[in-house]
Image (cartoon, grey):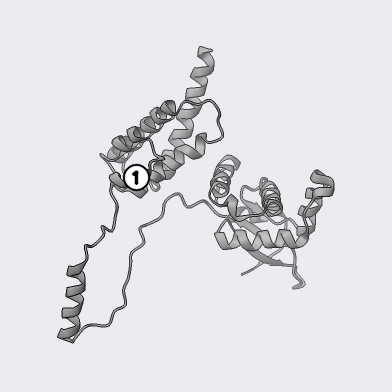
Amino acid sequence: MNVKSGNIEGFEHFSQFESLQEFNHHMEMWLLEHKIDFSKGELVGLKRLVRFAAKIPGVCNAKIGTVLKAIHAEYKDNGISRSTFKRMIIKAKGLGIFTAYETERKNGSQSSNLYVFNRFPLSEPPIQETLNHPKETNNLLKTEKDQKINKRKEQPSVLDHTFVSNRVPKRFVDFVQYFFSDAKLIEEYWRMAYICVHRLEDLDIEDVVDIAIDSFRQLIRKLKFTKVVRNPIAYYYGIFNKKLFQFFVILIGIR
């Protein structure tokens, strides 16, 4: 898809974020998940591109040369090469972090790319297996298939709360499993809490669990009374952030 070049303000409708804070939150989650996929130099290039996408949250049309110049100015002799930056673009596009559109001038010549950062997929619909087997008309084939099924025990398609990773505190699992027993879903709710607190030092894990449970309780109340939550995990993430802020306000007041 080719887009006509222009001022960054003209690309505002491409933004997927309501605010710079929301954009930064999603980028933190992208990096938490995929930081390991990039080299040190590629990460420098990605983070600088993110900073260029601050004016219109999640949208950037800076030239590669402009981005590299800014990196060299900050890191002096430790900048990155154009090839490193291009490798970063290929990786980030492949991972879904952003979408890159070619832009063209009025005369048809190519201009700088437009980078549109995507929201982090906070929840994913369950993958449904579709088997394209031909219709079986042969009784012998049916018999063999039945025999194979009878020889092995089918694994459950969804693992319940007893399969939740040991990294998730048991008290949190015990509370959430009354509402959602899917192990993967419980782990995803805890991961949202971890994203909020993983950089904070000296925060007692029991305090984190208390905030996480309280946030989940508020989410359930919202779901039961209004039923208008489009993305429960994203809503829970927002609740947890607010309650974490309130916790620190109270803590500072006590001290």
Identify the residue under disc 1.
164
Image side of residue 14 versus residue 239, left or right = right
| Residue at position x 74%, y 73% in the image | 108
Q: Position of residue 175 (x, y in %)?
A: 30, 35
Residue located farthest toward the top when viewing the structure as drawn:
255
Rendered view: 108 above or below 248:
below
Image side of residue 141 versus residue 235, left or right = left
Query: On the rendered image, what quadrant is the N terminus found in?
Result: bottom right
Q: Which amino acid lies under the numbered mark 1 shown in the image of this protein?
A: Val
Rendered view: 151 above or below 24:
below
219 and 94: which is toward the camera? 94
Q: Looking at the rendering, which quadrant does residue 38 occupy?
A: bottom right
Q: Is residue 99 among what the camera can see? A: no
Residue located farthest toward the bottom when viewing the structure as drawn:
138
Q: Position of residue 248 (x, y in %)?
A: 51, 23
Image side of residue 160 versus residue 249, left or right = left
Query: On the rendered image, what quadrant is the C terminus found in?
Result: top right
Q: Is residue 40 among what the camera can see? A: yes
| Residue at position x 78%, y 49% in the image | 71
Q: Position of residue 57 (x, y in %)?
A: 62, 47
| Residue at position x 75%, y 65% in the image | 111
107 and 149: which is toward the camera? 149
